[in-house]
Image (spheres, grey):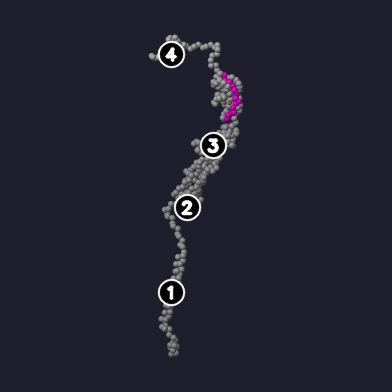
Amino acid sequence: MQRLARNEGRPSTGGGAGGVRRSRQRLARTASVLLLLAALTAGGAVAASAATDTPTPTPSPIPSGAPAPAPTVETPPFSTDGAIAVTGTRPAGADVQVTIASVPAAVTLTSSTTWRATATGVPDGQSQVRVSAGGQEAAATASVLRAPGVNSFSVVTTGLVSGTGYPGAIVDARSGSAACRATVGASSTWACLLSPPPPSGTGIPVTATQTTPWSSGTPAVGRGTGSFDTTAPGAAVITAPAAGATVEATGITISGTSDEDGALVRAYLSGYGDAACQAQVAGGRWSCTTGTLPPGPLGITATVTDPLGNISTLAPEVDVTVATPASSPTPGATTPPASPTPEATSSPEGTQAAPAPGSGSGPGGEDGGG
């Protein structure tokens, strides 16, 4: 009875188990509200961050059907030895084929997009360079001009030099202070005469260069030697006729001496441009005969030309007098007999034959008088 009395004395909770359930429901609703607020707050921050960040653009892919970039080629401005090195670009990873003067060149791929090619023995002239890469082509021109050839002669000349070169090129040759210029012919040869004449001697150095409208820079130099004789022979000496002599108009024999056998002596008469006669020196002597001469005073001189064309100075002039030929019979001379009188010939009717010389017929004659 006492236990029952104690229970009855506790305050009531208003329903027992039902009151506990209601407390738990209130706690659950409160937690749900808090979670919703947290979610809303987090969502707003993400949205704000998304609104302020700039997205990174994605590169557009290259269409598979677009053509690869064309290759390029660069050539040196000029070559003087036939060696050519060319460079250029190519599509990434593409193979490259290069020909120079239609001959395949050795190609080196220097990077994924560049290349280099070399060739030797390229001929003189302007040769085409062709490049193929990635299905496309490029072209350029390579210029080559070597030194001209210079002949080395043992044959003695008065300064003539010659050699070979590129057809149409201009060659400038030089030996000391002597120089000359020539154009290379279609046969690839050239020749010119040095001026002023180079000194006489053998093995004289000769140099030459060649240029064209498309060549540039310093040209290569060709070298050779020459043997030159540019010394003129001594003047001739006229020994006949003697100075002051009277000579016949029918012609005179001029003779003299020279110090160079094999040379040609030409004799000249005053007032005449061409040689009156000529002769070759043999044993140090020469002689030649002129044609008919006009009467009056006359000067005689001569020159000596050696086998190479070197010409001496004029010989000292010898003055003579050409006699006047007799033009009429001298007194007391016998008159030559007269020529027979030709007979008259018959004349056509209506005309009169001319009288024979010496006859008395005709106008003023005995039979025609009056």
Label 2: few (<14), some (14–19) or many (≥20) C-alpha neighbours in 10 Å: some
Seen from the viewer's position, the closer of residues 138 and 17 is 138
| Vertical side of 198 occupied by 369: above or below | above
- Label located before the other in sequence (3 or 4): 3
Q: Tell me the kind of residue under disc 2.
A: Ala
User: Which residue has dot 2 on it?
Assistant: 92
Callout in the foreground (3, 2):
3
Per the image, label 3 sits on a secondary structure element best described as: strand
Callouts 1 and 2 close, C-beta under 8 Å:
no
Give the residue type that dot 3 points to.
Arg
Q: Nearer the viewer, residue 48 or 40?
A: 48
Compared with residue 158, is residue 86 higher up or lower down, i.e. above or below? below
In the image, residue 246 lies at what x, y percent?
A: 59, 19
The Cα atoms of the two marked residues, 3 and 4, are separated by 75 Å
**How packed is label 4: few (under 14 Cα within 10 Å), some, or many (20 or more)?**
few
Q: What mark, if any, has residue 181 been given in the picture?
A: 3
**How many angstroms separate mark 1 from mark 4 (CA)?**
174 Å
Q: Which residues are magenta?
A: 310-323
Residue topped by disc 4: 354
Q: CA distance from mark 3 to mark 2?
A: 52 Å
Task: Indicate the secondary structure of the residue bearing disc 2.
Answer: loop
- Amino acid type indicated by mark 1: Val
State the mark number for residue 33.
Answer: 1
Q: Position of residue 290 (x, y in %)?
A: 55, 22
Most frequent secondary structure within the magenta stretch: loop
Closer to the eye: label 3 or 4: 4
Q: Decide which of tag 3 and tag 2 comes sooner along the chain.
A: 2
Mark positioned earlier in the residue sequence (4 or 2) = 2
Q: Nearer the viewer, mark 3 or mark 1?
A: 3
- x and y percentages locating residue 18 in the rendered image: 41, 81
